[in-house]
Amino acid sequence: RAPCLCLFDVDRTLTGKQGLTGDRCPGNQVLQGVWDDAYGGGDLTLSEFGEEGVRGTECEGCLLGVVSHGTAGGNTMKDIVTHKLGLPSSGWSHPGAIRSPLVMGCAFKPPCVQGVLDWYNQQGAGVPPESVYFFDDKRSNIEDFRGGPFNARQISCSSHEREIGRCGASPREIRLERGVYTC
């Protein structure tokens, strides 16, 4: 297949609401003592997808990256999140200076997605824009991709609190479908 790039938000995509597991969020895993500062903070809770990683999903075999509005927590949380995706944990970038597939502090996601694509293509990846897939729990972040060249899918559709996901992504939601999809 042609080269592809899958990019993921962190908070409530690769993670779930801190401490929420069991019947409410099956497949989520709490990592006691690993601080996650998102939405009030607490022990890092990986979503089902964040825990399992891309193996067995449609993104398996694609290049990977992270585009987050937040900070992706402290160094320990960054190490865990990137390890689960099979990415190096060092070299986080910021909007306007993207030098890796890991971007934090990105409030408006399309230019950051373009920056990661450009970075990969400068390494010789040859990924066309129509083969880029972005996953995020917030509808507004997905809507920002309408009319652009990239694909985007809202996840955590079965579990939302106000505007944000509760359980985070499940592996079933990681699909390579062209277009922009909200819950």
Image: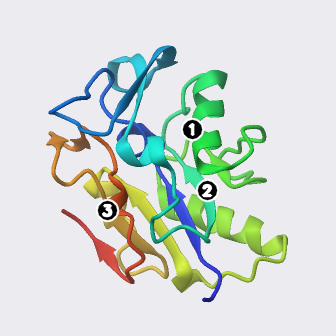
The residue lying toward the viewer, choosing from 91 and 147, is 91
Quadrant where the N terminus lies? bottom right
Disc 2 marks a residue whose amino acid type is: Gly
- Disc 1 is placed on an element classified as helix
For label 3, the residue is 172
Label tally? 3
Q: Residues under labels 1 and 2: Cα distance?
A: 11 Å
Find residue 180 and report its image quarter: bottom left
Q: What x and y, as percent, mark residue 164?
A: 25, 42
The residue lying toward the viewer, choosing from 122 and 177, is 177
Q: What x and y, as percent, mark residue 183?
A: 18, 62
Disc 3, disc 2: CB below 8 Å? no
- Furthest residue in direction bottom, as rendered: 1
Is residue 173 placed above or below 95 in the rendered structure?
below
For the question of whether residue 95 can be seen, the reply is: no
Q: Residues under labels 3 and 2: Cα distance?
A: 19 Å
- Furthest residue in direction front, as rendered: 56
Mark 3 or 2: the one toward you: 3
- Horizontally, residue 151 falls left or right of residue 21, namely right
- Furthest residue in direction right, as rendered: 123
- Disc 2 is placed on an element classified as strand
Disc 3 marks a residue whose amino acid type is: Arg
For label 1, the residue is 81
The numbered mark, 1 or 2, whose residue comes first in the sequence reads 2
Q: Residues under labels 1 and 3: Cα distance?
A: 19 Å
Disc 1 marks a residue whose amino acid type is: Val
Name the image colouring: rainbow
The numbered mark, 1 or 3, whose residue comes first in the sequence reads 1
